[in-house]
Amino acid sequence: QHLIEINDNENCLLMIYIFKPSFHYHVKEKILVSSDILCELLEVSINLILYTREVYPSRIFRRRKKYNIPVQMCVYPELSNYISDCIGSVKPILEKGEIEKLIIALLSKDRVVEKFVFDIKQEPVRPFDVKYGINTTFSIQIQVPEDYKQDVDMVMYFKHFLGLL
């Protein structure tokens, strides 16, 4: 387990815990590509967490587009660079395929106020040049607590969607 602390004020501490998996494997090109995307997602996520939880004043955030979706990103150079540096320190571990879980914890007065858990599964993927037949289908899997099961039953009606010709 690794710990990266983001601590720039005494009222709130952001901690990132990194859990290593019990096993790992290398699909070098896929991990490198996905680590860039995952690092960008984590950076955006931290910014959104800090913005929505009002850890910092909203005036230091500006609306930016990431993947054509408007998100709030920090424009205060010191904080923005600090977040980028912390995420940059996670990237080499991601590239090795050695992260299983990443937890972002917001603390106040040395007490965890809220946690955001990112389960990271780095599974080997099929090459992009594989051709699938015309009869290929796909399914969308939704995992919800039992309490929500009745609301999801209707979604299961659309479980298999045949490809369009």
Image (cartoon, grey):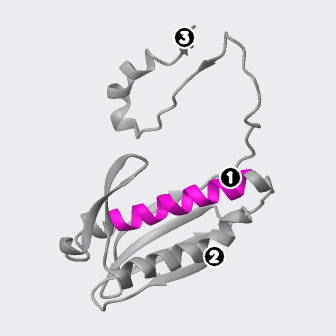
Give me the C-alpha separation between circle 3 and circle 1: 30 Å
Magenta extent? 30-48
Residue that mark 1 sits on: 122
Between discs 3 and 2, the one toward the N terminus? 2
The answer to whether marks 3 and 1 mark residues whose Cβ atoms lie closer than 8 Å is no
Q: Picture quarter containing residue 81?
A: bottom left
Q: Position of residue 12 (x, y in %)?
A: 31, 83
- The residue positioned 72% from the left and 20% from the top of the image is 132
The answer to whether marks 2 and 1 mark residues whose Cβ atoms lie closer than 8 Å is no
The one nearer the camera, 55 or 70, is 70
Between discs 2 and 1, the one toward the N terminus? 2
Q: Which mark is residue 1?
A: 2
Instruction: Check disc 2 and give the amino acid type.
Output: Gln
The image quadrant where one finds the N terminus is bottom right
Q: Up-down: is 102 above or below 13?
A: above
Give me the C-alpha separation between circle 3 and circle 2: 46 Å
Residue that mark 3 sits on: 164
Q: Which mark is residue 72?
A: none
Instruction: Check disc 3 and give the amino acid type.
Output: Leu
* Secondary-structure class at tag 1: loop
Depth check, mark 3 against mark 1: the one in front is: 3
- The residue positioned 52% from the left and 79% from the top of the image is 85
